[in-house]
Image: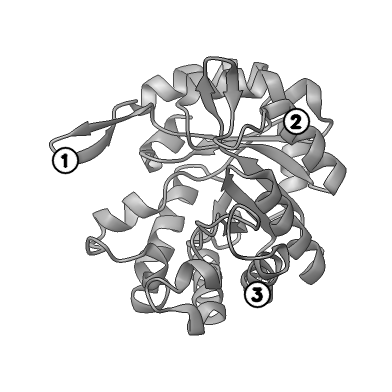
Amino acid sequence: MNWKALLKSQGYLVADGAMGTQLIRRGLPPGTPPEAWNLENPGAVADVARAYVEAGARIVLTNTLGGTRIKLERPGLADRTAEVNRAAAEAARRGAGDRAAVFASVGPTGEFLAPLGTRPEGEFIDAFAEQIAACAEAGVEGVCIETMTALEEALAALKAARRVCDLPAVVSMTFDCGPKGFATMMGVTPEGAARALEEAGADVIGSNCGNGIAGHVEVARLLRPATRLPVWIKSNAGRPELVGGETVFRETPDQMAAQVPALLEAGADIIGGCCGTTPEHIRAM
């Protein structure tokens, strides 16, 4: 699917929504990493992609947010890193068919680069490169580096993507709203991230998670004047609330859809959902 041509002709694109919660609805056991189901239940993974495409998504992400060797060490899947990622890409492609482009989801490792952490940049780049190469070999059409809070880690993932493939790369940061405005937990502002990521060679920049769609309208307004690149926004279904020990997102599909005109006016080009969103949210958007 030629997503670039569609974006140019249509003016905007809709991407998919949350993955993990959709797998839980399909029986993913508590405590099981979603990536494990790429091997154990690829049919369910493909079904999630298919549901989002049927809801109108024209970009779907692989089930590989935690797909680096570093992240997969914890559940004992590190030695199957390439296999996990290839299986995820194949499942997403089966679900998407020819109706949507499949991008590799590349998320944080959960660790800090040295000197805040113990691993050097080169180890991060190698881990991201292994993941991205496996997804590229399985036929993804782009790379989505997402949910990043440390600019250094985002840049390491982008370097890895450029090392192993020539696919378009989205880099999406997670911003929180504090007393001084929006910034990542590491203090990176939307404007600063946009400039650094464009200079580093990203093809699309943006934000996901951390905020509901109203907050992301404000983030988009900050990103848009700071970059010439397309802006990617994937919002949570509102702010998370803890109810009876369970995390709940209360924003309904209609409530999210009502904010879409403002989000597009603020400068977003590709929109979708993150935590708490469903195919119903994407259909409404």
Q: Position of residue 145 (x, y in %)?
A: 64, 52
Check if mark 1's residue and mark 3's residue have beta carbons within 8 Å. no
Ranked by sequence position, the earlier of labels 1 and 2 is 2
Q: Residues within 10 Å of mark 3 (few under 14, many from 20)?
A: some
The type of residue carrying mark 3 is: Glu
Secondary structure of the residue carrying numbered label 2? helix
Residue that badge 3 annotates: 130
Q: Which residue is the site of mark 1?
A: 245
Vertical arrangement, residue 279 with respect to residue 10, above or below:
below
Instruction: Determine the residue located farthest toward the front in the rendered image.
Output: 115
Q: Are marks 2 and 3 in contact (CB under 8 Å)?
A: no
The reply to whether discs 1 and 2 touch (Cβ–Cβ < 8 Å) is: no
Q: CA distance from mark 1 to mark 2?
A: 36 Å
Picture quarter containing residue 37?
Answer: bottom left
Q: Position of residue 280 (x, y in %)?
A: 37, 37
Say whether disc 2 or disc 3 marks the residue closer to the N-terminus. Answer: 3
The kind of residue tagged 1 is Gly
Residue 97 can be seen in this image = yes
The earlier-in-sequence mark between 1 and 3 is 3
User: Which residue appears at 69% of the width and 20% of the height?
Assistant: 222
Q: Nearer the viewer, residue 237 or 280?
A: 237
Image position of 106 (left or right of 75): right
On the image, the x and y values in percent for residue 33 come to 36, 65
User: Which label was assigned to residue 60?
Assistant: none
Q: Residue at x 44, y 36 (%)?
A: 283
Name the residue that disc number 2 marks: 192
Residue drawn at (51%, 42%) of the image = 56
